[in-house]
């Protein structure tokens, strides 16, 4: 295997000019095994006295995995213009290096290209040779999260089963579900035998399991992947039984009041003590077997009485984060969404959060608006930023978060979250909802635990979505550039997007196994001398067997997406809206995003817990939390108020996103706040639905009688087993569409706002597929034409199906078909 150093054609180039933000610096460029380092001596300001001591050299360090685009512009023939290399980085730094010698520029370009996208293996990244300096070497961030300890904090342990939950060992060896953690929490009335059968009905066996239990009302947030009813409407009694048991875990539970005063450091223990003693006795019942038939299940569900909390009936909810149309089309490939007549006493809401391809396209549009930041310091064009749709996507995620958090914390009901595979949008919504509900996750330690739990343990595909090993597609030589095919960025008509997902599943050859030292920040950072002092000269110990770190990998650019970036952006919005409620500051989030791509730590290099365990990441690499723990003071919020008191406004345990207050996270894009937010009309502080709610439900004050409620601003349609009255259940009018996030809802006998202008017949997907096959072999065209022949049009979110098909010729559609991974 070729060593990284063998890929370096030239290790040092003098007389190089660096341009960034329109500022030039002249110095020396070094190419190291894991970094590009530019070193220069700053010149004194014009007209100033010479310094008594020579100024210290300054350095900029750039890790190779953080490069997202590299272009070489050779010096034109018979021109005095210098050759230059322009870099775009995924931390939104933009650099332009100018060279006197064209050959040196080409050697540097080829070296960067090899060290960025020709490694092929994770164990050749910086994380496997990085050795921290004191005091960082004294910390072990791998120990910060222990699943059993965290669930015990939530009141769940083998010695405390009266809350209706138990810890299952069914996945202890990752054979039940390779992408799930080893420790799973399920209802205590559900046996592992039932789980085995239920797993057959969920994509990748990602069954509904607990991630959060509310300590006051015992309601839960659970997560899963999509069910697999397919066109035939298949059902699974064990899955239905599992969901019913989840929604019944707080039956007989006596809701307790929150402590009058507490702090984030002690509130968890105090709450657990109170809830433990306030629980009513629940009769012991042997776990049921997996042999229950449908009639028994239906009779059991019909005889159950829903618990009542604060005099209001529970409104349990299944949240499908996808646009309605995407979920419906997935039925054609054997996937889909719950048929609510089999999940009584609950409603289902489709959130309409776009898929990874749309999000990637949105971020690329922002980069295009900022791409000249190496030569200029001008403000990015406001129109280009707005047209990216990024803020709207963040707003949609926060609205979905608001719906989930209110359902659990205010309506005292259970929520099951899923989308497709349940590791992208599901992780965003689950983690953000817990931040809103639990003050512990707003502390630095709690936030680290939350990321470990909901993102790392539950299988967000960090390697897959981040592309640490680079791609040849990110490298170009001007005047030698070869036109490449579109990378399928997504976007456009929602029906076409949904078909991309369906087509992707038909062609899916991959599964979860393979679908695929920065000391300071800023250009003026004063760093150590130009050596790899933070890395070991000896290679990392290689295990005897080939594991996930040693496997040959390629980056699938069509499956990259800024999912975790969006989560951090949404957390930034909450910090900005509630500046005294978070222990950590904005810079903490910014540095965490940087280290996602720096590959200095092993935390984010793998796709799931199984891969990390088998690669022995905890023994062979350092945890990213080491970086923050040893620099804790740098990331603390000086305005943090840890006291929690539901009797005092502004100190309640729960917070909720403020409507209309989304803004640009200017700092992460390396811009001044005025550069990006001056043209945004921000909602005044304290505006929106209701900024903070206690455990009692309050009605927001609104002017006018026709304004939809908070719930209706989020939900445009619902689905439940029995259509209840009240609670604003009529779909909002189209004039409110700009504020809506839910594209549809569904019950056993009623559906609203399902993204079509007409109600399709019950078997419309089967009829459409049959018509589509008769019309041609191309599935996407056939299904499109088949559904169009039924008279079904897409929603107001995009053009009609017929128009979309006319704009997308068959060859183009087939090229752009992508996997709806999440």
Image (cartoon, helix red, strand yellow):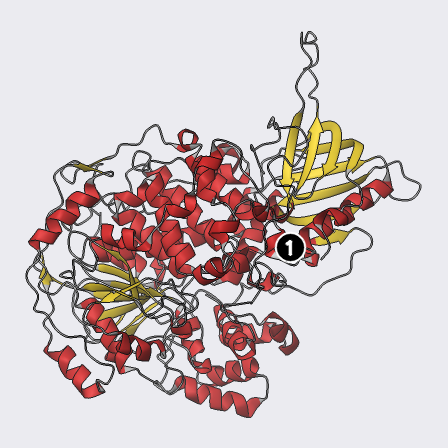
Residue that lies at the very extreme toward the bottom in this rendered image: 774
Q: Quadrant of the C terminus?
A: bottom left
| Quadrant of the rendered image containing residue 294 | bottom left
**How far from the left and from the top, in percent, is residue 361?**
56, 57
Say left or right for 712 vs 427. Answer: left
The residue where tag 1 is placed is 470
Q: Residue at x 48, y 82 (%)?
A: 788
Residue 7 visible: yes
The answer, for residue 340, to whether it is visible in the render is: no
- Residue 523 falls in image quadrant: top right
Taking 775 as reference, is 612 above or below it?
above
The answer to whether residue 164 is left or right of residue 675 is left
The correct choice, above or below, for 82 with respect to 212 in the image is: above
Q: Look at the numbered disc 1 and give the secondary structure of its residue.
A: loop
Residue 289, percent from left and from top:
22, 81
Q: Position of residue 814 (x, y in %)?
A: 61, 75
| Residue 546 in the image: above or below residue 273 | below
Q: Residues within 10 Å of mark 1 (few under 14, many from 20)?
A: many
Question: In the rendered picture of this protein, how many numbered marks are placed on residues?
Answer: 1
Residue at the spot x=52%, y=50% of the render?
Answer: 620
Quarter containing the N terminus: bottom right
Q: Residue furthest front?
A: 544
Q: Position of residue 238 (x, y in %)?
A: 27, 79
Name the residue at the right extreme: 78
State which quadrant residue 692 falls in: top left
């Amino acid at each position: 295997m070729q060593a990284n150093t063998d890929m370096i054609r030239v290790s040092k180039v003098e007389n190089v000019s660096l341009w960034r933000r329109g500022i030039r610096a002249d110095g020396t460029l070094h190419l190291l095994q894991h970094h590009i380092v530019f070193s220069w001596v700053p010149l004194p300001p014009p007209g100033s006295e010479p310094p008594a001591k020579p100024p210290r050299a300054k350095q900029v360090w750039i890790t190779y995995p953080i490069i997202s685009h590299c272009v070489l512009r050779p010096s034109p023939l018979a021109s005095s213009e210098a050759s230059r290399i322009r870099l775009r980085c995924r931390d939104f730094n933009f650099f332009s290096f100018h060279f006197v010698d064209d050959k040196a520029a080409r050697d540097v370009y080829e070296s960067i290209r090899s060290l960025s996208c020709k490694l092929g293996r994770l164990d050749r990244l910086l994380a496997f040779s990085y050795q921290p300096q004191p005091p960082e070497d004294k910390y072990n961030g791998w120990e910060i999260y222990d699943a059993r300890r965290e669930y015990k904090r939530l009141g769940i342990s083998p010695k405390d089963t009266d809350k209706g939950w138990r810890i299952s060992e069914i996945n202890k060896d990752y054979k039940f579900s390779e992408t799930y953690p080893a420790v799973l929490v399920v209802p205590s009335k559900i046996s592992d035998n039932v789980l085995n059968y239920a797993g057959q009905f969920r994509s990748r066996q990602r069954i509904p399991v607990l991630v959060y239990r509310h300590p006051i009302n015992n309601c839960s947030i659970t997560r899963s992947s999509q069910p697999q009813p397919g066109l035939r409407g298949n059902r699974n009694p064990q899955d239905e039984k599992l969901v019913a048991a989840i929604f019944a875990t707080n039956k007989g539970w006596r809701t307790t009041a929150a402590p009058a005063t507490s702090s984030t450091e002690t509130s968890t223990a105090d709450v657990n003590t109170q809830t433990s003693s306030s629980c009513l006795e629940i009769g012991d019942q042997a776990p049921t077997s997996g042999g229950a038939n449908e009639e028994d299940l239906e009779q059991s569900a019909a005889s159950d009485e829903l618990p009542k909390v604060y005099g209001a009936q529970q409104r349990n909810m299944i949240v499908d984060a996808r646009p309605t149309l995407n979920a419906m089309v997935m039925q054609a490939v054997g996937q889909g969404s719950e048929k609510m007549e089999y999940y009584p006493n609950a409603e289902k809401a489709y959130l309409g959060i776009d898929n990874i391809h749309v999000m990637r396209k949105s971020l690329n549009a922002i980069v295009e608006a900022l791409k000249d930041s190496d030569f200029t310091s001008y403000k990015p064009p406001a129109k280009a930023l707005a047209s990216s749709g990024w803020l709207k996507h963040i707003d949609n995620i926060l609205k979905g978060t608001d719906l989930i958090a209110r359902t659990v914390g205010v309506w005292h009901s259970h929520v099951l979250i899923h989308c497709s595979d349940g590791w992208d949008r599901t992780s965003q919504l689950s983690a953000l909802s817990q931040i809103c509900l639990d003050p512990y996750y707003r502390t630095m330690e709690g936030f680290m635990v939350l990321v470990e739990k909901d993102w790392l343990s539950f299988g967000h595909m960090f390697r897959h979505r981040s592309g640490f090993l680079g791609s040849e597609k990110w490298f170009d030589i001007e005047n030698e550039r070869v036109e490449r095919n579109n990378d399928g960025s997504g976007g456009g008509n929602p029906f076409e997007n949904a078909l991309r997902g369906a087509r992707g599943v038909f062609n899916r050859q991959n599964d979860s196994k393979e679908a695929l030292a920065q000391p300071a920040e800023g250009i003026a950072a004063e760093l150590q001398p130009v050596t790899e002092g933070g890395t070991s000269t000896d290679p990392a110990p290689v295990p005897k067997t080939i594991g996930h770190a040693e496997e040959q990998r390629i980056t699938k650019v069509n499956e990259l997406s800024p999912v975790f970036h969006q989560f951090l952006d949404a957390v930034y919005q909450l910090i900005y809206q509630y500046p005294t409620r978070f222990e950590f500051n904005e810079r903490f989030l910014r540095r965490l995003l940087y280290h996602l791509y720096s590959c200095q730590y092993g935390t984010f290099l793998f796709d799931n817990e199984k891969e990390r365990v088998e690669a022995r990441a905890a023994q062979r690499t350092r945890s990213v939390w080491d970086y923050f723990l040893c620099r804790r003071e740098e990331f603390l919020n000086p305005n943090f108020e840890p006291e929690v008191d539901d009797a005092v406004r502004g100190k309640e345990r729960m917070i909720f996103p403020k409507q209309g207050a989304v803004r640009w996270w200017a700092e992460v894009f390396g811009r001044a706040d005025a550069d990006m937010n001056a043209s945004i009309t921000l909602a005044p502080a304290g505006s929106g639905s209701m900024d903070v709610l206690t455990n009692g439900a309050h009605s927001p004050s609104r002017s006018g009688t026709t304004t939809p409620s908070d719930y209706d601003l989020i939900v445009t349609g619902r689905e439940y087993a029995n259509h209840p009255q009240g609670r604003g259940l009529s779909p909002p009018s189209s004039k409110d569409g700009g504020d809506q996030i839910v594209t549809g809802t569904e019950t056993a006998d009623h559906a609203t706002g399902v993204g079509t202008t007409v109600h399709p017949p019950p078997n419309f997907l089967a009829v459409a597929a049959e018509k589509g096959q008769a019309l041609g072999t191309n599935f996407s065209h056939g299904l499109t034409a088949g559904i169009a022949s039924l008279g079904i049009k897409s929603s107001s979110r995009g053009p009609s199906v017929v128009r979309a098909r006319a704009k997308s010729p068959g060859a183009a559609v087939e090229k752009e078909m992508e996997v709806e991974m999440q």
